[in-house]
Image (cartoon, rainbow, N blue to C red):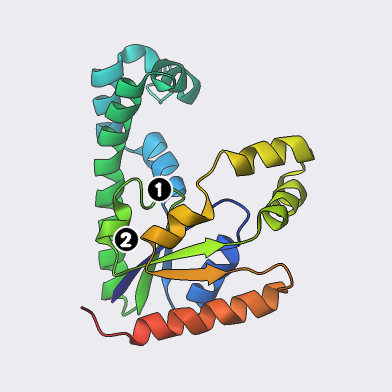
Amino acid sequence: MKRIGITGPTGAGKTTALGALEDLGAHVIDADAVYHRLLAESAPLRADLADRFGPGILTPAGEVDRKALGDVVFGDGEALEALNTITHRFILEEIARQCARAEAEGRPAAAIDAIALIESGLGETCDAVVGVLAPKEVRVRRIMDREGIPEPYARKRVEAQQGDGFYRARCGYILENREDDTPSAFRARAKALFAQILLTPDR
């Protein structure tokens, strides 16, 4: 079974690309969703976070107060690094469990969707890393339409993310979502690329 990492800036079309992978029978893992589910459900993760950042990050019911945690770590590089170190271990373990289950089910691939796939080191666990890119103006329009936010805020979101050069230098494959693409044309091209990756022998 192949482990395929999917990354790229917001609004580039990763969701459509992941749909193409699902068409091919892949199990899709949303790393951000895994993180949020672990915060809610993993007692060991909550305990480790409380040990490091204090009981003030927990609600009276023992759940993680995400705002309180954010107030503690953001703007403090050392604290943010500690948060990432703690959560990364739990996220990797859950992704490994899901990959093992997908392999046991006979799926051809597990796809890991993570906006920080490369920065987090998750990409190093993948057999192939695909960067999904789209022109900046297309991404701005998509974010505005999808989230109902004004253009200045959408542009700020786009400008805050890694540029195309970051992904081109670090991804084994680049999937271009062109300005003149229809969703169906892009999905078909994504499916063709993933089918090729699935047929590529492991190195």
Quadrant location, the N terminus: bottom left
- Under mark 1, the amino acid is Val
Left or right, residue 180 beside residue 65? right
Q: Mark 2 or mark 1: name the one nearer the start of the chain.
A: 1
Tell me the element at label 1: helix
Q: Is residue 151 above or below residue 141?
A: above
Q: Which mark is residue 128?
A: none
Q: What's the residue at 62%, 44% (across, down)?
A: 158
Q: Mark yes or no: residue 24 visible.
A: no
- Under mark 2, the amino acid is Gln
Residue marked by disc 2? 98
Q: Is residue 3 above or below residue 9?
A: below
Distance from Cα at disc 2 to Cα at disc 1 = 10 Å
Depth order, front residue of 18/181: 181
Whether the residues at callouts 2 and 1 have beta carbons within 8 Å, the answer is yes
Q: What's the residue at 68%, 78% (across, down)?
A: 184
Tell me the element at label 2: helix
Residue marked by disc 1? 34
Left or right, residue 51 beside residue 118? left
Residue 36 coordinates in the image, percent (x, y): 44, 40
Residue 97 coordinates in the image, percent (x, y): 26, 58
